[in-house]
Amino acid sequence: MGGNNIQRACNTVDSLKRTGMSSSLDILGEASVSEHEADEYQKAYLEMIPAMSAHMQAWTDVEIVDQLHGRAAPRLNVSLKLSSLYSQIDASDTKGSVHAIKQRLIPILECALEHHAFVMIDMEQYDYKNIILTCFLEILEESRFRHWPDLGIAIQAYLRDAFDDLLRIVEALKKRATPATVRLVRGAYWDYETIVADQNNWPSPVWLHKNDSDANFEHCMGFLFSEHPVIETVVATHNTRSLAAAMAIAESHKLSNQDYEFQMLYGMADSLKNSLVQRQQHLRIYVPYGETLPGMAYLVRRLLENSSGQSVLDMGLTHEQPVDLDKPEFSLHEEDKKHSVDDHFQNQSLYRLTETAERAVFVQALSQCRQQFGQVYPLTIDGKSYHTKQSIISITPASPEETVGVVASADQRQADAALASAKKAHVYWRRVSVTERANHLRKIASLLQDRRVEFAAWQIFEAGKNWREADADVCEAIDFLNYYADQAERLEQVAVDQSSGEQNTLCYRSRGVGLVIPPWNFPLAILTGMMAATIVCGNTAIVKPSSQTPVIAVKFVELIHQAGLPDGVVNLIAGSGADIGEYLANHVDVQVIAFTGSIAVGSRLINIAAQLHPGQTHIKRIIAEMGGKNAIIVDSDADMDEAVTGTVSSAFGFQGQKCSAASRVIVLDHIYDSFLERLVETARSLRTGPPEDPGNVMGPVINTQAHTKILSAVNDGKQQAQLALYDSVGHFGKGYFIPPVIFKEVTADSMLAQVEIFGPVLSVLRARDFDQALQLANNSKYALTGGVYSRDPDHLQRAKSEFNVGNLYLNRKITGALVSRQPFGGYKLSGTGYKAGGENYLLQFMDSSTITENTMRRGFAPIEVHKDK
Amino acid sequence: MGGNNIQRACNTVDSLKRTGMSSSLDILGEASVSEHEADEYQKAYLEMIPAMSAHMQAWTDVEIVDQLHGRAAPRLNVSLKLSSLYSQIDASDTKGSVHAIKQRLIPILECALEHHAFVMIDMEQYDYKNIILTCFLEILEESRFRHWPDLGIAIQAYLRDAFDDLLRIVEALKKRATPATVRLVRGAYWDYETIVADQNNWPSPVWLHKNDSDANFEHCMGFLFSEHPVIETVVATHNTRSLAAAMAIAESHKLSNQDYEFQMLYGMADSLKNSLVQRQQHLRIYVPYGETLPGMAYLVRRLLENSSGQSVLDMGLTHEQPVDLDKPEFSLHEEDKKHSVDDHFQNQSLYRLTETAERAVFVQALSQCRQQFGQVYPLTIDGKSYHTKQSIISITPASPEETVGVVASADQRQADAALASAKKAHVYWRRVSVTERANHLRKIASLLQDRRVEFAAWQIFEAGKNWREADADVCEAIDFLNYYADQAERLEQVAVDQSSGEQNTLCYRSRGVGLVIPPWNFPLAILTGMMAATIVCGNTAIVKPSSQTPVIAVKFVELIHQAGLPDGVVNLIAGSGADIGEYLANHVDVQVIAFTGSIAVGSRLINIAAQLHPGQTHIKRIIAEMGGKNAIIVDSDADMDEAVTGTVSSAFGFQGQKCSAASRVIVLDHIYDSFLERLVETARSLRTGPPEDPGNVMGPVINTQAHTKILSAVNDGKQQAQLALYDSVGHFGKGYFIPPVIFKEVTADSMLAQVEIFGPVLSVLRARDFDQALQLANNSKYALTGGVYSRDPDHLQRAKSEFNVGNLYLNRKITGALVSRQPFGGYKLSGTGYKAGGENYLLQFMDSSTITENTMRRGFAPIEVHKDK
């Protein structure tokens, strides 16, 4: 906020004043992506309030503008977005978010109080609503603001719970006995809320029909007017019907023009504004201003909002016709019904974590897990438990002195027993109908769904995932079970090209014993996916979990057996990969190997699988998903807010320990410096610490070897490129924590650009143009994931055809592929198989038979196919 | 035909005579599957005619029965099926078939002449029509039969060319000046003809609508009556409308009841028959009799014919209602139109070879090929021809002293050049649109279609295929081109599970350079299939043809370039597999290997492909189709005619040199002896010799090594089992001929039951029940093709779920899978890949990318997916 801006703001409010309107100033800026930006945002208000206030004090009184609610209204009125005051705002950490926001909000409020300015807290997307409302309600009760009436909050009538929120506010205001303002709006994020809810299979927080939003708007307005003067009401609308309704309802409550105000946006509906002023209505104009980079987001949103066919505001303006407004509950009912009857595969919904109760179950599950720490777990072979002399001690990487559990470790004898069990079970299992096998998967999914949070909690401890990552892993496991169940049924019998007198069908058959070797980074999801695919096809499985995360595997196999899966269909043997893993992979009785892990182990297994041993009567099938060195290209016209947050989230989510994680970001020369600056600040703002605390986005890396290896790579990297971010790791105790590391000016062929580090280390490369950016992106032996942030349709098209990756993401983060929606997997050295969570995946676990039946007998066909000819 | 049967026949004709009807005797038996059966059939007539004739001479005269056409009609009237007089009857060898049939027919005719019997030649399926008609016309002109009027032929009015055939007959009769009889029937093979035409994409030889058959029947009848007395007419129908029409038309031509006769089947429509007799019409009853095993086929056909909803005869009987009969041409027109607008993939039709002109083009093409024998052919690299010092001499295995061609043989330098060319071409070719690549394939298919017979002729010489096998190979090549073109377009962009605010697409990408190593046994089809799949996916190809069949490969690559395929997309280098084959398979620049051949070479290539060489940035994909030791199970209730001919055709087609060929037949104990006996006689009846002559079903094996190896396996086999058939190979000259070899009582684990011999050697195993049969069938390291002949639905169902083969055939031969209709390929040690000619095949030649585009911008989505929610 330079003085230049303030001068322009003065001019604007002066001219509004001349036309009889008051103003509310909003400094452009939402989605502060770093704490640095949050500080800047706060500073802007702290500078603007005294300056503007001084300017406006010099005005002469105009009653219609200055008098409101029977007193002199503050001349300066500012609107404020709380999300801009804390870059790490997150519903899962509501408490921490409220605390951090208030740290920066209170000085602004104190400043406003001192300079007799009104502060209106804007409402934002639904994920932040409870945080924003909580901040407001807590502020109301702070003793220094207790008698301050010049404070307000916006409430969005398009939300289904708007009325309940109004009740909470009225209750609080009655308690404090000083009024405050509610600005009733319809809400500006309708598309966003609808899409986000749809993408996550969440119930929509907004009314889906305009009529319902309208009805709720008038319903809430009536309530607000009825609570006058406890609540002072602002009606924010451009809709003539709503304006008329407001006046009529106000009149019915015997309110005068001075007892409420209207608000409209600057630059819109000017004739409407003038008629209100002529009617002596109090009209405040919402004036966004500023020119900082983050401000662009706001302007774009407002532009789109006013051109979107679905915008509630827009619909009000353009489809001006009398409608009957039903009670909103009516159509809600219909929507919900429609949702429940849809039997198409649906991804399991993540917890939204906006509600206190949702967050409480996590806290409880974590506590219950911790109580079980240190227990001893057996192997499971043929449904029976085996304890062994050797065992694997599984620790929690956030505090390695804590033992999550001790798991029996198999040797060759147990491996042989597991093979015998799997072979025996196959004889029975392969004859079980596909539907029955699929239903076993669905049963497991259903049990897992019931115990989601528990399974997430184990991962938070054993793998070091944060709440959301752990929740996502469990959801993906559930998805794999349900999806592969559906797919197996789909593939049960595929009709092929038919002809008269014969019937051709394609059938699939199980192969035999499958060896499943999952990684530790998605210890439940990938284990479950590879196992589910193996067994739903009629194979039996030997699962050798990662030695870093054996407890989650044991817990899951316990659940499988509770679900009633026959003994021997899944056998669990933890143990050394080099030892029993290779022994099993080499074994003549193993027919399929499903592996996810490093290229080193993967290429060794590919080699082993290609050997034809004496007596072997099959060629082993291997599905190997391996590494990545994934790049995001940031084009010169990219949306910076989205590129920065998307890159940070892709690179540092789960500490960069995903095969899909971004480890290279290739930035166009033109914007390299500004992008890098925001990237570094954004990454620096991520909180690192034990993932039990939902405020810590970044947890530990998996173990001491990984910790050492990553730090050593960082050390080597310093010889090749410049460190742009490398904060001390000293203050996190004994956990294997590494906060985000960013290298800049990384060169194309250096280790930092070529080698998968598998940790929170991001290399920034500079590209002179989009061609070179693509070339750099493709300069890798891997081809797993990749992303492009660009607004140039040609560049997006070129990326689609030329960016060599298995999963390409345009204008979004490059991690978090969902089963069915984003079939996942790479090529080059990233993998050998067809996409997990995709239609072709199961083909790899089966053989196929074409069955041709001659239906013509002695020249006659019982079915009269030819009749249609 | 025992005396017992003759006695029963006498009783039947006696009782018919008593009711005023005459008779035509037909000895049951069609589809003589061996020359032995043909001899038996002839013998039956030679015995029956004198015996029956003597019996009937003793009758007293009854005018209505005995007087016809103004003379005493022969009391004995026999019907005869010419196909039963030659087991190798085949349209492709019309001349040979006519000759062979006449050899056995003339003695019957002489016998009939001597014993004053009438001989009616039945008409059979369309494939034999011209052979049968030709026999009849030639007999008419034989001097000893020239003045014999007691001879007739059946003409089927449901055939579109029935009228033209009548014209030919009238012309011949006018020339010889002695009348003969035409029995006008509707035709009894309507289902069969329709299905066969549909399965082969041939134009239907029969009218598709009953009305058209009816109209044609009356049209032909009118013509026949108008040609009285040159032609003497028999109207064979049970349809009252047709009967009435016949009488009316006869009257209009001023014919008396003695000038024509009616015929009906024995045991049907008795009241109708009686009314005809009451009307003093001449009525002859067609009496089939006999009890030999082959006779069953006839009875079954007659039973089904009279219960099939589509049977013309049946429709006439049951849907007795007046209809307007259009000119048949009218609906023909519609049918044909419908056929031509169907743009769904259709298999290329084989030549039906019923027409003289079709056969003539084969003869001509063979002659033209032979004129080109001995030419020298180059390699093709990057569109340029290369001659080399080393070369491969390709001989014709039927007469090894003849050199088909001399083809340049590549060494490592040319292999490197081919790689460089393919790599360079890939840069361009992968960016060519899928549609354009698909159209290149279609163009090649179209050129190949124009030159089908030429390409078949080369195979007849170079591979030793017979006409039909060679034609089928070329058709399959055309099918692969068209089918993979369609499939590539289908896979171009696959939408996956969608969600609001994002767009998910699955795209496929080329891998790079593909190495194509086809076998010699389908030297064009498999080469073309693997090559087409490689290049339509955007890869480029290096084709290393088999050293046994390099000329056909060179000819095809010439054609490809004539079709305008860009240089370097397909490079042809003949040469040693152990040498340049392995060199290329090992090369770091080869990304896909498509191989069809032996398990020895295949497993070696699988091993090579699994190596990760320094600098390699991909895991090689290998598609290996290997051997089989394919079994047919003949259940105790199997249709013997079909089981015998299906087994013989599966085992000895192309001398057993197909990976799909039957090399084991597992016969249920109960029918083992009778099946074996017919099997041996049927196989023995196959004619072996140079495949230029279409009368030789069996040609040579591919080369001297194969000849030696197969004979040595036969020699070894003698130690393990009993030879049931092993005819001398001495009289075939220098060609590598081996007539069918059959071993009986082969044991489960012997070499004869386990090792792929790849020649005309069939092992017969005995099974005590169906369980054991399945167990024996599955007792193999291979799982390629298999078959079951059974009428037991439970057994067929068990085979479907338990017979471990990639292609299972029920009640038909196990070779001849068609592209798209029978996706082809095995598992266990038979192959690694997805089915050729099936929907998943192309997946193996590509990598895939899921592209996820965020379509939500700042909270707004341009496409309103959510509106439908």
Image (cartoon, coloured by chain):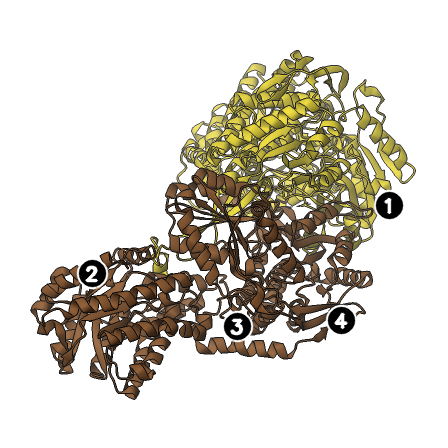
Chain colours: A brown, B yellow
Say if labels 3 and 2 share a chain.
yes
Say if labels 1 and 2 share a chain.
no
Give the mark toward the camera: 4 or 2.
Answer: 2
Which residue occupies 37% across, 64% down?
A39
> In which quadrant is the N terminus of chain A drawn?
bottom left
The residue lying toward the viewer, choosing from A146 and A420, is: A146
For mark 1, what is the residue?
B747
Q: Compare marks 3 and 2 and give the one earlier in the sequence.
A: 2
Hey, what amino acid is under mark 1? Thr
- Neighbourhood count class around disc 1 (C-alpha, 10 Å): few under 14, some 14–19, many 20 upward: some
What chain letter is assigned to the residue under label 4?
A
CB under 8 Å between discs 1 and 2: no
Hey, what amino acid is under mark 3? Asp
For mark 2, what is the residue?
A9
Hey, what amino acid is under mark 2? Ala
Say if labels 3 and 1 share a chain.
no
Which residue occupies 74% across, 56% down?
A581
What chain letter is assigned to the residue under label 1?
B
